[in-house]
Amino acid sequence: MELTKEEESALKGEQGEIMQMAYRILVATGEATDADKLIPIEWAHLSGVNYNTIGDSGEEFLSGISKTARVKVKTTLNPMGFDIDNVSNYGLDDNFISKQLSIRKSYEAMGVIPSFSCIPYEIFDIPKEGTHVSFAESNAAIHANSFNNLKTNKESAFSALASAITGKSPYSLLRKEDSPNITIRMKVDNPNEMTYGMLGFFAGKVGNDSVNISGIEEMDRRSCKAMCGGMGTSGTCAKFLFGDGESNCEKVDFDKKEMNNIYDELNTAEKGDLITLGSPQLGLEEISDLTSKLKGRSFKKRCMIFCPRIVKDQAIKIGYTNELQRAGCEILADCCTCLTPLINKNNVDSVTTNSIKGAYYLKNSNGVDVNLKSISQIIKDETR
Amino acid sequence: MKKILVKGKTQGIILKSLNPINFLGTVDKQTGVISDKNHDLFDKSIKNCILVFPNGVGSSVGAYTIYSIKFNNVAPLAMICQKADLTVATGCALANIPLIIVNENEFSSFHTGQKILLDTESLNPITNI
């Protein structure tokens, strides 16, 4: 990768340790993506916020760099571990809470907007078509590339942080052109959001940087998010293109058999002790839809709903939260199902969710069993 | 054809996996043990080995996991992958874990238990010892 004189000087450490670290990360990113130069980006979205995921080493690292590091472009943030409004209900220890607040403080000191959301594409204005951004959250990167006409690598937590600090990112192949070498033919009838989640999970396993998807009808927002979440979990793939692709593309079918394989891999329980909705976090539209679907019914067991703070505030104003709380829901802002410290295998055996991404991390990281069900099935089976 | 993503020199014993690794969620930060029951390295620790695997997958926060296992002294001595991905590349860059990308033939020639010297500055960066 070619660097300008100024970039070389930063890499040598002539602009301080932080810049040197950031350029070391960008150079590794550039080599990994066969980029020939660095280009400016307008928006970085960082992962690495939840204390449950980054631990003491991450907390100390951020506290250290936050003394001098400042972001150069608009920078937003992934979810953290809890909602401060109701954290006392969940028995988290004081150490977790104070370490999480330290992480928050470090990001704020660097000038990051404390959005604590994995759906930045739904709560911030989208820049004009073709704008280069650096999104670390995997579902957000895929959503930005596939549905928002933005351009990003499937950044890592560190490559996005380096982009935030320098305002630059390597000009990788993914940023330049779309040339998937594989087309996935969607062959499952009557898909719901879980089907799309599994299609994404499958696509992530078989695709490299990007894939074509054929045979897809109009999708609602919930299904788009589910597909991006599933894909981000299983692979390195960062973009869907809709259509058949070039004639020389390898064709792979996503049929009932492939879908059932994924279902059997992720569904490990007949029923759940509690329900989680939101991985990716729910937007206002999904909360509104849930409220109207409930039609006065109540959940028979605990139901945790994860959303961004701004969505929770809007839902309070409109009155959705009243209705959801009446139905027995717990509404949590700033955090997410994925890697939540609020679900613990010591007191929960299994969780019901409609999220493929959530299922993967609940199973592998939280160590609980998962019962997969679509939102309409959840309302049918789990409410009265 | 080898590509050096993170420089360094070390020697050790290869632990090879044929499955991609999702560092976040499936690698224990304190012990370096892999917790995914469907993974071919399930229940094995990646501490102090030369970890050979196709590529990283999944969450971008996996880069912090790589930094954490280094910080907790349970990281591999070096990593060798077949495909470069940003989570592994940047995690290794920040943690100073040497990382080399090799082609398919070279990848298939490695096996668990093989003792190698890895030196990214050498003309032949990977040699048997």
Image (cartoon, coloured by chain):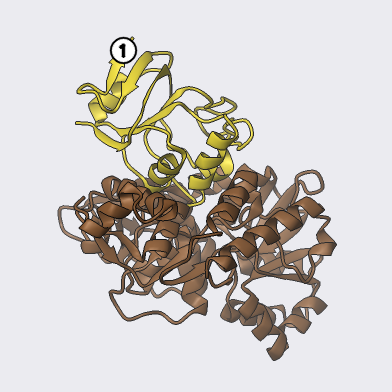
Chain colours: A brown, B yellow
Quarter of the image where one finds residue A84: bottom right
- Where is residue B57, by image quadrant? top left
Q: Name the residue under label 1.
A: B128
- Helix, strand or loop status at disc 1: strand
Amino acid found under the numbered disc labelled 1: Asn
Q: Nearer the viewer, residue A303 or B111?
A: B111
Q: Which chain carries label 1?
A: B
Q: Quadrant of residue A296?
A: bottom right
Locate residue A302 relative to residue A310 in the image: left or right: right
Label 1 crowd bin: few (<14), some (14–19), many (20+), radius 10 Å: few
Residue A113 makes an appearance in the image: yes
The residue drawn where x is 50% and y is 40% is B66
Q: In the orientation shown, which residue stands out farthest toward the top?
A: B129
Look at the picture and state if A114 lies above or below B60.
below
Quadrant location of the C terminus of chain B in the rendered image: top left
Please name whichever residue, A223 or A50, is drawn nearer the observer in this view of the structure.
Answer: A50
Q: A381 left or right of B40?
A: right
- Residue A226 image point, x, y percent: 50, 64
Q: Residue A99: percent from the left, percent from the top?
A: 70, 54
On the question of residue A267 being in view, the answer is: no
Q: Point out the residue furthest to the bottom here.
A: A318
**Residue A321: x and y, percent?**
74, 81
Q: Looking at the picture, how far across and down is residue A106, in whole percent? A: 60, 61
